[in-house]
DNA sequence: AAATGACTCAACCGCGATTCG
DNA sequence: TCGAATCGCGGTTGAGTCATT
């Protein structure tokens, strides 16, 4: 079934030999610089295809198989909050790629209740029940408690932060065990519970009184959320988002200046 | 056993955003 | 400041597989 485009670049399913070449390349040079991968490997593939294959299939720690009940539950609520922002949602589901999440949603969750496993969902996304994230990038931030995957870590500053609660060898910021993955899911689930109970039952406007979207904090973390093609010198989906309200619920208050500090107490 | 339809998921496409010279 | 290159993402497609007739 293989084919190639007008420039002769191979398309279609990957062979085992191609997988080995790509895997060896990434292990040697690291993720990123995808435009160099075809040159380094000799693969007749475009950079996008190489990145996609790595992120969605070859990358370590990818969780395969059915979604657990907890994952489905969290997925439903995150989708309710975020809509089709698969990379962000996947970032809350350790080991799941955005493509996985998207495929799962499109194949399982769009079925009518009774046709699918899991609980019914609200099919219609309206302006009043969806919160779009408002990116607010920050760095040098560490949460000293909670799941490791909820840590906020600026890769450029990790070595300067003695308080970071993360394994130095694990710059992917992924859960190291299924127990941690479950803990991460539970943590986000609880957080969403609190945020939903506190705010979502009210009719939150899309824009606040300053004309900005109420929503999420964006910082740096990668609990495993991945999207397909593209490239970056940092692992994909390094965004970390905090529900504004959850931020307060967690005891941080609403002083955004806190975010500039090296660490923030939690709980 | 063969034909057909339904389903899954890997992969591609296109476009807006970002980076870089 | 601008244009080209690259990245990141969501939407869509289609080949392979499974279930049903």
Image (tube, coloured by chain):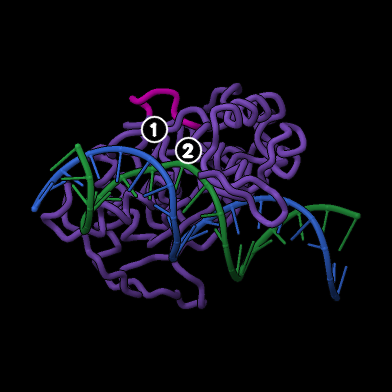
Chain colours: A purple, B green, C blue
Q: Is residue A264 visible?
A: no
Is residue A16 magenta-colored?
Answer: no
Q: Are there few (<14), some (14-19), or many (20+) residues within 10 Å of tag 1?
A: some
Position in image of residue A92 (x %, y %): 41, 44
When asked about the image quadrant of residue A5, the answer is bottom right
User: Residue C16, image x and y in percent?
Assistant: 38, 40
Which of C11 and A97 lies nearest the eye of the viewer? C11
Q: State the separation of the CA atoms marked 1 and 2.
A: 10 Å
The residues colored magenta run A174-180
Where's residue A160, x and y in %?
69, 30
Element type at marker 1?
loop
Query: Which label sits in the foreground, 1 or 2?
Result: 1
**Mark 1, residue position:** A63
Helix, strand or loop at disc 2?
loop
Would residue A15 be found to the left or right of residue A118 on screen? right
Which numbered marker is on residue A17? none
Q: Are marks 1 and 2 in contact (CB under 8 Å)?
A: yes
Residue A178, magenta (yes or no): yes
Residue at position x 51%, y 77% in the image: A211
Determine crowd level at label 2: few under 14, some 14-19, many 20+ residues with C-alpha closer than 10 A.
Answer: many
């Amino acid at each position: 079934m293989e084919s190639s485009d007008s420039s002769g670049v191979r398309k279609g399913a990957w062979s085992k030999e191609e997988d080995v070449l790509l895997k060896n390349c990434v292990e040697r040079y690291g993720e990123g610089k995808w435009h160099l991968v075809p040159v380094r490997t000799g693969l007749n593939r475009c950079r996008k295809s190489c990145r996609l294959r790595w992120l969605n299939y070859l990358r370590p720690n990818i969780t395969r198989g059915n979604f657990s009940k907890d994952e489905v539950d969290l997925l439903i609520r995150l989708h309710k909050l975020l809509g089709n922002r698969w990379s962000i949602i996947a970032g809350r589901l350790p080991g799941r790629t955005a493509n996985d999440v998207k495929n799962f949603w499109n194949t399982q969750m769009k079925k009518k209740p009774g046709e699918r496993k899991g609980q019914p969902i609200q099919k219609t996304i309206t302006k009043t029940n969806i919160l779009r994230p408002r990116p607010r990038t920050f760095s040098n931030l560490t949460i000293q408690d909670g799941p490791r995957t909820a840590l906020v870590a600026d890769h450029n500053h990790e070595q300067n932060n003695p308080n970071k609660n993360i394994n130095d060898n694990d710059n992917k910021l992924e859960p190291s065990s299924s127990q941690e993955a479950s803990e991460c899911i539970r943590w986000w689930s609880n957080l969403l519970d609190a945020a939903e109970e506190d705010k979502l039952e009210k009719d939150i406007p899309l824009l606040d009184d300053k004309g900005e979207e109420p929503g999420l904090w964006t910082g740096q973390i990668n609990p495993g959320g991945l999207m397909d093609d593209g490239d970056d010198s940092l692992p994909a989906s390094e965004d970390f988002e905090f529900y504004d309200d959850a931020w307060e619920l967690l005891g941080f208050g609403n002083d955004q200046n806190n975010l500039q500090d090296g660490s923030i107490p939690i709980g």
